[in-house]
Each structure stands twice: as C-alpha cells, then as structure tokens.
Image (cartoon, helix red, strand yellow):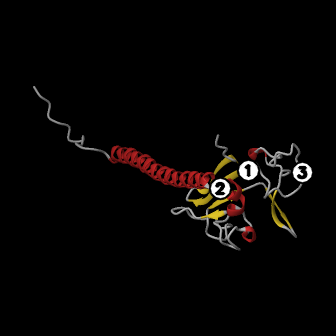
Amino acid sequence: MQRPPDRGARAGFTFIELSIVLVILLSALLVFSGTVSGMAKQRTSNRETHLAVEAAQNRMETLRATAFDAVYALYNRNPKDDPDGDGSAPGARFDVPGLDELPDAGDELEGEVVFPESEDPLAGFELREDIVNAPLGLPRDLSGDNRVDDQDHSGSYLILPVEVRVRWRSPNGPREYTLRSQLCRWIKE
C-alpha cells in the first residue's frame, strides 16, 4: 500500500536553494562580462598598436626613399636648415591619425623622428657622433674619418642612425612604439 504524502514536506525550491542558484548565475555572469570587457580592451590595444607600427614603418620607408644627403635636413628638429627655406620641410614630428597624443606632446603630433643631435645655444641642433645612445649604436664614427669627435656632422655623415618613435595616450595608459635603423648611402655598381 502507498503512504499518503507528508503534509509537512513542500514541493519546489527553498529560499536557500534559490539563493545559491542565483549566486552561481551571478558569478558566471560577472566572469563572462569581465572576459568581454577584457577582449574589448585588447582589441582597442591591438588596433592602436597596429596604427603605431604602420605609421613608424611608413615614416622609416619615407626616410629611406629620400635622397640620403637631404634626410637629416628634411626630418630634423631645426626648421632653419630646411633646404627650401625656414619651415618648408616635413620636420621631426608627424601625425598618426587614430591615436591620441600624450598631454606633454604640446603639438598634437604622436610621431617623432629622432637623430643623435645635441642643441647648441648658438648653432642650434647639431648631428653629433659623441652622443651616448646605446640603442642607436652611439657613440660611433658617422663621417668615416675613423674618429668620434664633438663636431656637427650634419653635412658630412656617411651613416645616419635614426629612431622613429610613436607615443600615444591609450585607455590602458601611455604607450610607445619605437623603430630604429641605420641609414647609409646607396651605391649603385
């Protein structure tokens, strides 16, 4: 014979069981939303890095395609030595569309071409061999006279170390991409 059901037992979920299920579901939702948020930040970071790398590579290729003797005068920080008159050359700074400049940039340009230069109070910027910059392989003989001196070699360089740097403000904080190379005269035979 069957026993009649106990009237004290309840059918369904208790409040504690329901609370446990809700906590588990909420935890899973938080993990999922954190993953989605992280993926969105990573996608933004990847896009920004791509823009910076592409801009730096393009600027380096522009430098390589420029007449070697004119590279320093066209892309240095001194507008007074521009071949076609003051301020006529592209200069050292360039814009990278899609990236936000750092607050300390001051000119809203994210990209910069850097040479081993020193600023003389009277002469202005000078291309120097005696600058200490290990990533650019300096100090080193740039003019081919087998000595490293403290003179301006902007008119006598045979090797031109260059760094193309892109600095920008990202949601993840300040970011930077740097590309370095040694330019030299192309000799056809």
Residue type beneath disc 3: Asp
Which residue is labeled 3 in the image? 149
Mark 3 and mark 1: Cα distance apart in space: 15 Å
Residue type beneath disc 2: Ala
Is 88 on the left-hand or right-hand side of 28? right
For marks 3 and 1 on the same chain, the one whose residue lies earlier in the sequence? 3
Number of callouts: 3
Mark 1 and mark 2: Cα distance apart in space: 12 Å
Q: Quadrant of the N terminus?
A: top left
Q: Secondary structure at mark 1?
A: strand
Q: Are marks 2 and 3 in contact (CB under 8 Å)?
A: no
Q: Residue at x 60, y 65 (%)?
A: 101
Is 86 on the left-hand or right-hand side of 49? right
Q: Are marks 1 and 2 in contact (CB under 8 Å)?
A: no
Is 15 on the left-hand or right-hand side of 141? left
Say which mark, if any, is on residue 160.
1
Q: Nearer the viewer, mark 1 or mark 2?
A: 2
Quadrant of residue 189 within the rendered picture: top right
Residue type beneath disc 1: Leu
How crowded pointer 2 is (Cα within 10 Å; few <14, some 14-19, many 20+) is rated as few
